[in-house]
Image (cartoon, rainbow, N blue to C red):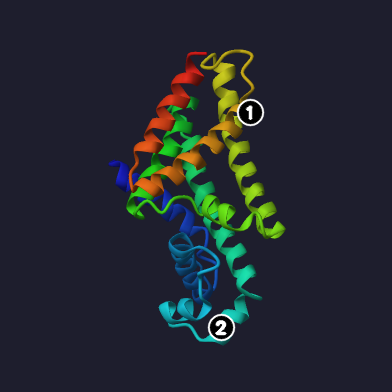
C-alpha cells in the first residue's frame, strides 16, 4: 500500500467516526476545517462558509451557538481524525513501537503535503488565539496533551522492550516530540516543503535511540 493510499485510509477512518452527525452539520464541519486551515479563525466569515456549503443561515445556528462554538466543534472533528490515525499506527502490532510512533508522523506529513502544507489546525489556531482566548488556549492544550499521552504509552512499550534506555522518561519524550513537531509544521508551512518535518523526525529518533 502506498503512503498516499495509507494516509487517505487513515483520514477516511476519522471521517467515518462522524457518520452519525447530521449531514448539514458534517458538511459545515468539513468545510470549516479547510477554511480554518487556510484562513485562520479571525478571517473565517460565517457568510462565506454558508455560501461555500450552500447552507441557510438558520441551519448553521441550529447546529452551533456561534462562531466560537463552531470552531471548537471543528477542533473536535479534527481530533477524531487524529485519534483515528493514532489508532491505525500505534496499534499496528506488526511494527516495533518506535516505528509505530514515527509512522504516525510520517502519515501526518503526507496529509500535510496533500493539503498544500497548511500545517496543523491545532498549531495554527493556538498561535492565533491562545493569547486572547482562554477557551481556545485550554482546548488546544488539552488536545496536545491527549496526543502526547497516547504517544507516551507507545514509547513506554519501547522502553520495556529495551528499544529505549531503561531510565528514559517517556512522558517527557512524548511531550517534546509533539512540541518539536509543531515547530517543524510551522516551518513546513512557511517553506511549502516537507523538509523541516523530515529533518526533525530524523534528528529526534536518532537522538532517542542513541542516548
Which residue is more in the foreground, 104 or 132?
Answer: 132
* Position of residue 134 measured from the top left corner of the image (x, y, whole percent): 71, 57
Please name the residue shown 51% across and 48% down the image.
82
Q: Residue under label 1, please give it.
A: 172
Q: Residue furthest left?
A: 2
Q: Splitting the image into 4 quarters, where does residue 151 fall?
A: top right
Q: Residue at x 54, y 13 (%)?
A: 162
Residue 3 is drawn in which quadrant? Answer: top left
Q: How many marks?
A: 2
Left or right of 73 in this view: 107: left
Residue 146: numbered disc: none
- Looking at the picture, tell me which residue is in the foreground, 57 or 207: 207
Q: Which residue is mark 2?
A: 59
Q: Is residue 142 above or below residue 179?
A: below
Q: For the residue labelled by badge 2, is the local secondary structure a helix, a strand or a loop?
A: helix
Q: Nearer the viewer, residue 89 or 187?
A: 187
Amino acid at each position: 500500500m502506498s503512503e498516499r493510499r495509507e494516509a487517505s485510509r487513515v483520514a477516511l477512518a476519522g471521517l467515518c467516526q462522524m457518520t452519525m452527525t447530521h449531514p448539514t452539520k458534517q458538511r459545515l464541519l468539513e468545510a470549516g476545517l479547510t477554511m480554518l486551515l487556510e484562513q485562520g479563525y479571525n478571517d473565517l466569515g460565517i457568510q462565506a462558509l454558508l455560501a461555500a456549503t450552500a447552507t441557510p443561515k438558520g441551519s448553521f445556528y441550529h447546529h452551533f451557538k456561534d462562531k466560537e462554538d463552531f470552531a471548537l466543534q471543528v477542533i473536535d472533528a479534527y481530533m477524531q481524525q487524529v485519534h483515528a490515525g493514532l489508532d491505525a499506527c500505534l496499534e499496528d502490532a506488526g511494527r516495533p513501537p518506535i516505528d509505530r510512533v514515527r509512522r504516525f508522523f510520517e502519515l501526518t506529513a503526507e496529509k500535510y503535503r496533500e493539503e498544500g502544507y497548511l500545517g496543523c489546525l491545532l498549531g495554527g489556531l493556538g498561535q492565533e488565539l491562545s493569547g486572547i482566548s482562554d477557551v481556545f488556549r485550554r482546548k488546544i492544550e488539552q488536545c496536545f496533551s491527549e496526543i502526547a499521552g497516547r504517544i507516551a504509552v507507545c514509547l513506554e512499550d519501547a522502553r520495556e522492550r529495551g528499544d529505549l534506555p531503561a531510565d528514559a522518561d517517556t512522558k517527557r519524550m512524548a511531550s517534546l516530540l509533539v512540541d518539536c513537531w509543531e515547530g517543524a509544521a510551522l516551518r513546513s508551512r512557511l517553506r511549502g516543503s516537507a523538509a523541516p518535518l523530515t529533518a526533525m523526525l530524523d534528528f529526534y529518533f536518532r537522538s532517542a535511540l542513541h542516548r
